[in-house]
Each structure stands twice: as C-alpha cells, then as structure tokens.
Image (spheres, rainbow, N blue to C red):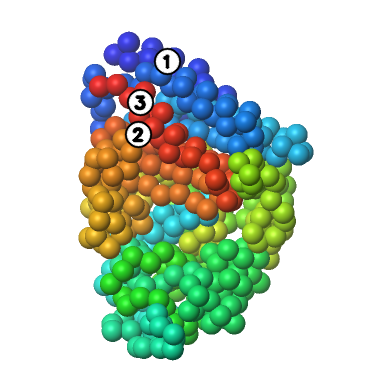
Amino acid sequence: MKRGYLLLSLALICSQAAWPQAPAPATAPAAPAAARLDAARLTRLDKLLADYVEQGKIAGAVALVLRDGKPAYEKAVGWADKEAGRKMTTDTIFRIASQTKALTSTAILTLVEEGKIGLTQPAGDFIPTFKKTTVSVRSDSGNIVPAKRAITIQDLLTHTAGISYGTEPHVAALYRDKDLGPAAGNGWYTADKDEPICVTMERLGTLPFVSQPGEAYVYGYNTDILGCIVEKASGMPLDEYIRTRITAPLGLKDTRFFVPPAEKGRLAAVYGTKDGQAVRSEEGSKGQGSYVEGPRKSFAGGAGLTSTARDYARFLEMIRNGGTLDGVRILAPRTVDLMTTNQSGTLHSSTGLGFGLGFQSVDRYGANGMAGVGAFGWGGAYGTTYQVDKQSHMVLVLMLQMMPNGTDIQQKFNTLVYQALLK
C-alpha cells in the first residue's frame, strides 16, 4: 500500500495546483494491485504538450487524468490568451461545445427516472411541431416526404432521429431561411440568439430532416431538442435544471452556459489551425463567441456550456462510479449502463464503436486506440476531448480552444496516457 501512495505522489509532480481533497466514494471499485501509472512514462506527456506549444501548433492546454477518482496527472501548459500574455492555469474556463451533450443527456435521464419522460415517448408530446415531421429525400427534385414514425426520446439520445445541423446542400437553404443551420454560425452555435432554446427548436420542427427516424446515425440538433424537452417536462429553464440537479450537488462551480463578466479573465481565447500554426480567431459566432456578453437567453443543450478540466472530470467520475460521487447520487447504476453501452447497433459504426444514451462506446479493443472495451467518451468543436475507461479506472480530459483543430494532439494525448499504464 505504501508503495502505491509513493507512485501516486511521483505522478503528481506534474500538477501545478493542489487538488481539493474529498473523501473517496464508498462504492468506488479498487484498482488491481499490480496496475499503476508509471510516473517516468507520464513525463512523455509533459514533452508532448510542451512541444505542441513551443512549435506553435496550439496556444495552450490543460490535461487531467483521474485514477480511481484521484488526480494521477494534471498539467497546464502555454497560454490561455497569448496576445494578452495570460498563461494557461488549471482553473482556466473553456467552451466545451458538444461535451454539453453529456450533461443534457444526464438531465433527461433524471427525468426518465422520475417517470416524467419515457425513452420511447414521442418528442411531439413535448414540442407540438414534432408531432408530425418530414424528411427531405436526397434527389434533384428535393422531394419532402412524411416521417414513417414519430421521433422518440431514445432516437434523440442516440442521434438516430435523422436530424442534422442543416448544412447538407439539399436542405441548407431551408434551414438558412429559418435562421438555423448555416445561418447560426457553425450550425450548432446559439449563444448569440436573443430567444429561448424552445422557440428555436419549435421552429426546427417545421423543417424537413435528412433521414427517417431509426434508420441512420445523424449528428445534429438532437440534444438541443432534448434540452427543450427538459424545460417542458421540468418547468425550469435548462440552465437552472442542470445547476440544481447536476452541477450544484456535485460542486461544479465553473460549469455554466455563460461566463460571469467578473470572470472573463479566466476564459481561454479561441484559436484555429492555419498552415499548421495556431492563429487567434476573430470575434463572432465562428470565433470567440458570445459566452460573456451574449443575450444569455439561449441555453443550448447540445453545445452551450463552458467548464474547467476539473469540473468536467468530476462530472465524468460520477458517471464512471455508477451515478454517484461523494455521497451524492445523480443517476441509478442501471441508467448509467444504458448511457455508456451501445444502444444503436451498427448505425454509429461497424468497426467496434457504438453510441449509447449520450456517449460513444468502445465495443472492441482497438476500435479507439488503446481504450478498453466498455470505455466511453466524446469531444467538442473547440478541441476539448474526454474518455472514461472503466477497465483502467481512469478519466482522461484534455482541454484546449482550437477551432478548427488541425492537430493530432487529442489522439496522442490518449496514447501517452495508456502507454504509462502498467499491469
């Protein structure tokens, strides 16, 4: 046991700030006695992160690895805002884009557990424009046909409802006319909208989708629709529901849809890859976004949150631990199993990756690098990424702000964590 603590202490040399101590969850599974993260091998990750900053590929990043809920590696490198001379720190705030989907999916499933929503219930029970939806058939004539069946909550959770971000050529003009898709910045971006998310989603329901429900994996507005359904079923705005039911109970103080103006200095700047180098992005919907000065009316369940590495890792540790953390239960273990195991067959992938009720799942070793079978994760458009590996008892989080991200740092980050895992 003493040897285990010594190794953990060595790994923590990389940390730039003390991790707030909390009692270990009573139900957390113990790691195999022979399995450990080798401190010397983890220093390779130091070099990777430093090299990407020094070579100008990224401005900065925060990397965090938890093992059985304890920090095994934590490092902030480079700049949160290079032009302003503001260094990256472990409490820097990031736009997490599609990593928002995991929290909104969790919110939906808390309502499922309360009997307020059913997984097979039609979305049209909550949003009238979804009672009868249509599909645009890919053809020169642009035929629009009725959907074969109603879109369900589970269709939305697994991204099999046939709903995209409206960027396909045969529907783009229709979406643009409704201030969606190409007219909404990057399609998924709504932080600058001066209307509640349900108003936007009700308008979405009048547009044709791109596939029949249940017939294909189509990534799009699915989780934004779920965010509206959370509001309808709970009677609360989505930000309030997530705060009262998930983030506040877990102590996640920095996970919010909009950054308070007083904390603007903690928000990382957005960069993008140009000719292999990180170049600061312009203001506006396709760059820095309106996450501080926006109207603060649109709580986008699919892409709207900001967070820190520590906050997000703590949320994921709750999921890894079967829905509970430090005496706070958010979900039941059976519900977490539904979230984190493949519920969409081969619609998402035929190569060993599945999609559950909010997460991509690893069904075959080698389908996602060295991630073990049962691992799950996703990422965000600003370059953030995460993975939870049940076999290894690990949570991996990498935060950066690169859009577009033309680097391979995400894959290398995961690889260099796994190569340090000895067993």
**Residue drawn 28% across the image and 82% down it:** 149
Q: Amino acid at mark 2?
A: Met
Q: Report helix, strand or loop for mark 2.
A: strand
Q: Position of residue 408 (x, y in %)?
A: 48, 40
Q: Residue at x 49, y 37 (%)?
A: 409
Amino acid at pointer 3: Gln
Residue that appears at 37% across and 73% down: 162
Q: Nearer the viewer, residue 394 or 275?
A: 275
Give the Cα separation between the discs numbered 2 and 3: 13 Å
Check disc 3 and report its element: helix, strand or loop: loop
Q: Is residue 60 visible?
A: yes
Residue with the mark numbered 1: 40
Where is the C terminus found, in terms of image quarters? top left
Instruction: Indicate which label's residue lies in the foreground, 1 or 2.
Output: 1
N-terminal-most mark, 2 or 3: 2
Residue furthest to the right in view is 84
Label 2: which residue?
Answer: 394
Q: Is residue 371 above or below residue 186?
A: above
Q: Is residue 235 left or right of residue 77?
A: left
- Closest to the observer: 69 or 46? 46
Q: Earlier in the sequence, mark 1 or mark 3?
A: 1
Asked if residue 235 shows in the view, the reply is no
Mark 1: secondary structure = helix
* Residue linked to disc 3: 419
**In x, y percent, where is residue 58?**
61, 38
Is the residue 412 above or below the residue 299 in the image? above
Q: CA distance from mark 1 to mark 2?
A: 18 Å
